[in-house]
Amino acid sequence: MEKNTPPKDNGEDVDPAIQSLSKGEEIDAMERAGPRAPVVYASISARGLEELNRPFISLMGSGISAGLILMMSVIGEGLIHHELPKFQGAELIADIGYTFGFLIVIIGRMQLFTEDTITPVLPLLANPTKRAFMRTGRLWSVVFTANLIGTFVAAFTLTYGEIVRPDQLHAILEVSSKVMENTPFETLRYGIIAGFLIAALVWCMPTLRGGEFLMIFFITYLIALGDFTHVIAGSGEGFLLYLDGKVDGAWLVYGLIVPALVGNMIGGTALFAVLAYVQVMEEISEDKKPARSRIPYTPKPTGPFSSGRSSASKDAAAATRAGPARPKKETKRTPR
């Protein structure tokens, strides 16, 4: 009677469950496993390179649009707060409105500064040249300025454009006044969490398959619940308070925008982006080749001229039908 002998350790990690699969089953298992971390990294890095190469006018236009639309988060929270009766826990419902602007901006792929704390940083960490630093600084300065222009225009229109009723504007200002309760250092601390969460959201986006809406909703709802400071949405609230005369320019800049900016960059760049790079830097290094699957995956050709088989298989089938090639007869040439 034969005894079951354990498999020999040849230095490779094996799993009998995987080895027992057929080729088609293994391919299906690989697809269900989702992308590897280096694939997610490469996806976000490719987006960052695309943003770095965008023209100035495109960045400005998209950034201003993002700032304008992100004010819908402040407006949405204020309007829900206005319509709700006064009861304990009403803020839990009103905070849902904070997600509105983020949903439109992120799903619409507009240039939002806090997303850019990770997307252009990943290629910068992989290739830290002077040119890369300059291009990243250009992207940050343009997008940040454009976002602030957008939030200021929206705040100015809300204050003087009479596009909402006075009681609604009062409710929006009441919601915005929460940023006045924090000291500059508290604003910076809370900004770290907001920056980290937005960077985590950007990291998760390539792996989501139809779940982008819920992920954006829950991440931004969490930011609203914790009163964490987002520099762009917070600048919109600050501009509203400034135009209403509740704060001065010095507090707006040095008490809100600058601390929130520093906090978001620490959370998004210094923490999350660096950690994201560290977890894949060995796998993407040039001196290591990527691991290959036991069964190579060859996708089926697509297009109007493909019939489900590759050109190589068609050539092989044609050669089989034709049979072995006949050798050519050599003709002797007689000298003249």
Image: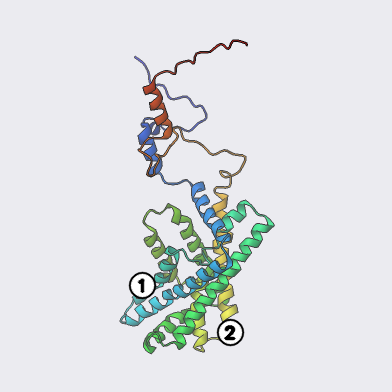
Quick check: 211 above or below 189? above
* Residue 155 seen by the camera: yes
Q: Position of residue 236 (x, y in %)?
A: 49, 78
* Tag count: 2
Quick check: 134 above or below 159? above
* Residue 180 seen by the camera: no
**Residue occupying image coordinates x 36% and y 31%:** 22
Quick check: 8 above or below 163? above
**Mark 2 or mark 1, which has the lower sequence index?**
1
Which numbered tag is attached to residue 218? none
Q: Residue 265 sits in which quadrant?
A: bottom right
| Amino acid type assigned to the residue bearing label 1 in the image | Leu
Q: Are marks 2 and 1 in contact (CB under 8 Å)?
A: no
What residue is disc 1 on?
92
What residue is disc 2 on?
249
In this view, the residue in front, 301 or 94, is 301
Q: Could you classify mark 1 by the number of other residues whose Cα lies within 10 Å: few (under 14), some (14-19), or many (20 or more)?
A: few
| Amino acid type assigned to the residue bearing label 2 in the image | Gly
